[in-house]
Image (cartoon, rainbow, N blue to C red):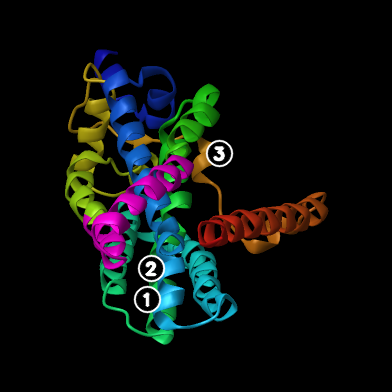
Amino acid sequence: MKSNLVNTPINVSELIESKMNKKFKYNLLIWTFLLMLLEGFDVGSLSFAAPILIEQLDITRSTFGIVFSAGTFGLMLGGFIFGFLGDTFGRKKSLMFSILMFSIFTLMTALADSISSFIIYRFLVCLGLGVTVPLSIVLVNEYAPNNAKGRWVATMFVGFPLGMAIGGVIAAWLLNHFDWHSIFIVGGIAPLLTLVFLLYKLPESLKFLVIKNKSREHIIKLVKQIDSTTKITKETKFIVNNDETNVKFSPKLLFEKELKFVTPIIWVVSITSSFVVYFMNSWLPTL
């Protein structure tokens, strides 16, 4: 009887729901919040430098708008591509790769000297930026208890607009003391330095590791971080709730039954609202 009790599978979904400790919670929220701060700064970095760039490149605002458009396309494509990578290789690995990508190309933007080079670098920067928000939301959501998912994600996401706001102040100081290159140097170095800490501090999704049958040692380590009192033996198995295991996504699911009306409406609202927000954030600093 005792042996059967010890070898009872550990449901990590239930563990997260009932045993989540404050240290693990705050570690996750603080680092993803910081990541959103950096994301906000880098999304707005080109806007902060745009007035000077337009003057130095001797081009019209409408011509420079192509650079912003390249960024918008990169954001959209990045979320699509890296979303699949996150489901295949893990939320954390894909997130780390995206941070490395947008950091490097943000630094390279400081070397740009023509409208074409700005278009290329901005597209590549935003290709990486496009996945940071959705993957961070997924990671936080998979660790949040059901009654706190909205609060956790909202707390994390506050960092994004705050990053743009603080970024404007930082950019103004940099432009007063240096030149436009400094905005992209800071915007590239800051996330690279943060990446070093994220590699050690940010956890991979425990549910992802269990569902994909990944490293047992990694799973045990995360389980112990969430609840150090959990008893684990060599025979202990780890599971998640059935409704999280048996989900096989297909695009057809988005249009089944009443979703055939709901999905297009959500797409239209999301695309238009994102367009307005990005358009305003891009052009307001140039006015």
Quarter of the figure with residue 185: bottom left
Point out residue 209 in the picture as x, y percentages from the top left corner.
Answer: 33, 45
Residue picked out by circle 3: 243
| Residue highlighted by disc 2 | 125
**Looking at the image, is 62 positioned above or below residue 193?**
below
Q: Residues within 10 Å of mark 2 (few under 14, many from 20)?
A: many
Q: Which residues are magenta?
A: 160-189
- Asked if the stretch drawn in magenta spans residue 165, the answer is yes
Marks 1 and 2, Cα distance to the nearest angstrom?
A: 6 Å
Residue at x-position 55% and y-position 39%: 243
- Quarter in which the C terminus is drawn: bottom right
| Residue 276 visible (yes or no) | yes
| Residues at marks 1 and 2 touching, judged by CB atoms closer than 8 Å | yes
Precedes in sequence: disc 3 or disc 1:
1
Q: Main secondary structure of the magenta part?
A: helix
Question: Which of pointers 3 and 1 indicates the residue nearer the eye?
Answer: 1
CA gap, disc 3 to disc 2? 36 Å
Query: Disc number at residue 121?
Result: 1
Q: Residue at x 31, y 58 (%)?
A: 175
Label 1: element kind: helix
* Mark 3: amino acid: Asp
Q: Residue at x 53, y 61 (%)?
A: 282
Q: Is residue 286 above or below residue 159?
A: below
Task: Locate residue 95, reporting x and y percent.
Answer: 34, 55
Question: Disc 3 vs disc 2: Cβ atoms closer than 8 Å?
Answer: no
Q: Amino acid at mark 2?
A: Val
